[in-house]
Every structure is written in C-alpha cells, then in structure tokens.
Image (tube, rainbow, N blue to C red):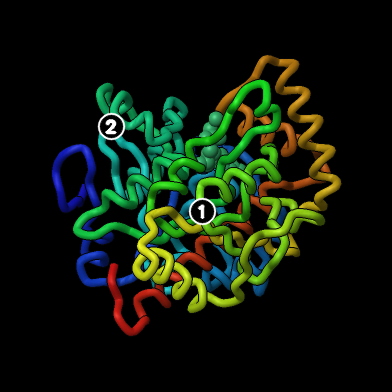
C-alpha cells in the first residue's frame, strides 16, 4: 500500500502527488460498489457498444469481462473515465479500519468481493475503525474524506444519485446524512439527482432550506436518476458548461465566503435512461414488496435494484452505469477546468 500519511486517514501517494502539484483530482464513493451495484449481472450490450456514449467517455470500447464482478468493473470504468478526461481518480473507502483516499487495484477488488463490507456514512467512521472494519463510503462519508485528503482537500466528487428525504418522512423522518454533508462540506458533487426511491420534491425543498446551490447541467428540470428528467420538478439554477460551473463554485466559496457543498445535477444519458412512468410503477411495486418483507433503512436500495434487475425486459444496470460514467467524466472536466483557471487554488 502506498500512502503518504500513517494513521487512520491515508491519502494514496498518486492522489497526494496530484494534490501537491495542483493537478485535478476527482473523489469517487464506494457505497455504490459494496451496496449499490450487484456483483452479478451485465449491462445491456448496447450500453457498451463501440462509438456509444460510454465508449466515448472512457476513450475506447469497454473490455467487459462477463466473468468478472459487475460492481468492480463498473468502478474501474469510472476511474477510466476520470483518467480519460485528464484527472486523477481518488476512490474512497474504509479498509481494515483506516479511511483511505485512493486505493490500489488489488484493494478495490478485495472490497468489491467482500460480502461483509459495511456501508459507512460519516457517523460510522469511529466505531467501524475501532473494530478494523472495511466499508463502502456513502456520499456523506466520502465528502468528509475529500476534506481530510492531504496535502490539500479534494473539492470535486462524483456519484450516481445522492441520498435525501425518504417517502413517508412525515411519520418516520428518514433523511440521509448526505443532505447534512452537502450543507456543511465545501465539495462540489456531481450526481444525477437523488435516488428514485426518495420523496424528490421534499429532497429539493430540504436542499433549499440547507442553502445548497443545486445547478442543472444543461437542464432546468431535475434529473431523476436512471429515469431521465422530471416532468414537473425544476432546479433553481442552470449552467450549460463546465467553466461556468467553476466560476459559480469559486464565487460561492471564495467571494461569498460560504462553506456548503454545491450539487451539480447531470441527467442520465438519454439512450440509456428508463421511461419515468415505467420507473414509478417499478419503484412503487418494489417498495411495497420491501415493506411486506420487513426490509427497511439502508437495505432498501439494494433490494429495489435487485427487484428491478429481475424484471426481464428492463436493464436498470445500463442506466445506472451510464449515468455513473457520465457524472465521473463531467466531474473530471470540471476539475480540469478548475485547474486551468487564472488563479488555481486547490
Ligand atoms: N444512489 C443509489 N444507490 C446507492 C446510493 C445512492 O442509486 O446505493 C448510496 C450513496 O452512497 C448515498 C447513499 O450516499 O446511498 C445514501 O444512503 P442513505 O439513504 O442510507 O443515507
Ligand atoms: Mn437513512
């Protein structure tokens, strides 16, 4: 393992060198590896076709191995997309009790195969570390990790969809710590909106209350994760190119002295998106089944994804993979433009 600092927070040497030299770095989470994407399964062949969107963003047709774990290959494609755009990927996870910012390939593979890995939010760091556990990190946990990177914080991070306000919040206030992290950690997060199983209008309201700028990348409508764009939900701001997003963030943090995160929402590429009305039906059916089986809390998303994957003429993996890669690539372009600016603070 090559890291720059001993102790319970360690930045990988490749990431630390890039941060020291002011080169672009993009943080990536691993809850998607341990709890979001399954180990078994394939994207639809069309998703990986030569000349398609995924191929364009990773700089070649993906060398997909039908026998290797889907979750591992997906995160490897995210790293590839970040590198192709000219930035250094920093995959964040807890490994044997240490919070790691950047992993070696063997460590990533071991985590992908580790069925005992926990799902860590930031509240879980201390207790999980005390028992030397390994865990995938949520958006909240990964944003904290970005701020702990040495020798300088990482300020750009990509994920699939953030956590938010769950349906049924008025009887049980299940509100993701991702929202609190967005309110308090000055990190730009690129996501395709929030998880579809959430109460999306309530999630947008909460982001508003918390003072988090939500910026549609080339869209006025809220992206609904794998289901394309909302018919009726509007985001407060729209910016159409990466330099404008860099300007907005610089001014938000430096000129206006604010310390919240910034959420940039990027729609799932249209070719791979699932029809939103179809998605509504599937989510409702999946949630009802989860409730009937007594599944709740952080187990709901993996259950829902599995229930959709078993729907034979639908392949949510293609949509999920496609938006993850698209978000990683956009975050990397923003990171590159950030460092190409006139004065390039970290
Ligand atoms: N979006 C998905 N699948 C996921 C997640 C988001 O489609 O697994 C993960 C992200 O890591 C996010 C976390 O930070 O779920 C939020 O979980 P919770 O609602 O338990 O805070
Ligand atoms: Mn929750």
The residue located at (74%, 37%) in the rendering is: 308
Q: Quadrant of ligand 2?
A: top right
Where is residue 288, by image quadrant? top right
Point out the tag, 2 or 1, that comes first from the N-terminus: 2
Instruction: Determine if residue 37 is in view.
Output: no
Disc 2 and disc 1: Cα gap in Å?
Answer: 33 Å
Q: Which residue is mark 1?
A: 212
Where is residue 136, by image quadrant? top left
Q: Which residue is mark 2?
A: 96
Give above or below for 80 relative to 145.
Answer: below
Q: Nearer the viewer, residue 70 or 252?
A: 252
Q: Circle 2: is it few (<14), some (14-19), or many (20+) Cα within 10 Å?
A: some
Give above or below for 322 relative to 139.
Answer: below
Q: Circle 1: is it few (<14), some (14-19), or many (20+) Cα within 10 Å?
A: many
Q: Which circle marks residue 87 in the picture?
A: none
Q: Nearer the viewer, residue 38 or 290?
A: 290
> Of circles 2 and 1, which is in front?
1
Residue 337: x and y in percent read 42, 77
Instruction: Determine if residue 339 is in view.
Output: yes
Where is residue 36, by image quadrant? top right
Could you tell me which quadrant the C terminus lies in? Answer: bottom left
Q: Secondary structure at mark 2?
A: loop
The residue located at (60%, 48%) in the rendering is: 66
Q: Is residue 332 left or right of residue 145?
A: right
Q: Nearer the viewer, residue 181 or 285?
A: 181
Residue 185: x and y in percent read 38, 50
Q: Is residue 308 left or right of residue 20?
A: right
The residue located at (62%, 57%) in the rendering is: 323
């Amino acid at each position: 393992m090559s890291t720059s600092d001993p102790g319970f927070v360690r930045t990988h040497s490749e990431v630390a060198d890039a941060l020291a030299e002011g080169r672009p770095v993009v943080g990536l989470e691993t809850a998607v590896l341990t709890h979001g994407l399954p180990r078994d399964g394939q994207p639809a062949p069309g998703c990986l076709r030569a000349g398609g969107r995924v191929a364009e963003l990773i700089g070649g047709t993906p060398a997909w191995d039908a026998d290797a774990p889907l979750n591992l290959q997906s995160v490897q494609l995210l790293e590839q997309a970040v590198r192709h755009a000219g930035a250094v990927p920093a995959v964040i996870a807890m490994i044997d009790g240490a919070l790691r910012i950047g992993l070696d390939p063997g460590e990533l593979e071991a985590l992908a195969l580790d069925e005992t890995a926990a799902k860590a939010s930031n509240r879980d760091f201390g207790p999980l570390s005390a028992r030397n556990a390994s865990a995938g990190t949520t958006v909240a946990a990964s944003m904290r990790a970005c701020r702990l990177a040495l020798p300088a914080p990482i300020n750009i991070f990509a994920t699939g969809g953030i956590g938010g306000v769950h349906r049924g919040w008025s009887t049980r206030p299940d509100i993701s710590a991702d929202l609190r992290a967005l309110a308090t950690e000055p990190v730009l997060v690129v996501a395709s909106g929030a998880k579809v199983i959430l109460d999306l209008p309530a999630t947008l309201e909460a982001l508003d209350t918390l003072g988090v700028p939500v910026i549609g990348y080339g869209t006025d409508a809220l992206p609904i994760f794998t289901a394309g764009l909302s018919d009726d939900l509007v985001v407060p701001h729209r910016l159409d190119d990466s330099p404008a997003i860099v300007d907005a963030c610089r001014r938000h943090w430096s000129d206006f002295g604010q310390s919240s995160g910034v959420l940039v929402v990027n729609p799932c590429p249209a070719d791979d998106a699932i029809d939103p009305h179809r998605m509504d039906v599937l989510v409702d059916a999946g949630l009802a089944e989860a409730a009937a089986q007594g599944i709740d809390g952080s187990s709901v998303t993996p259950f829902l994804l599995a229930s959709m994957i078993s729907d034979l003429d639908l392949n949510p993996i293609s949509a999920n993979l496609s938006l993850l890669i698209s978000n990683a690539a956009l975050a990397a372009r923003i990171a590159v433009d950030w460092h190409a600016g006139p004065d390039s603070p970290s």
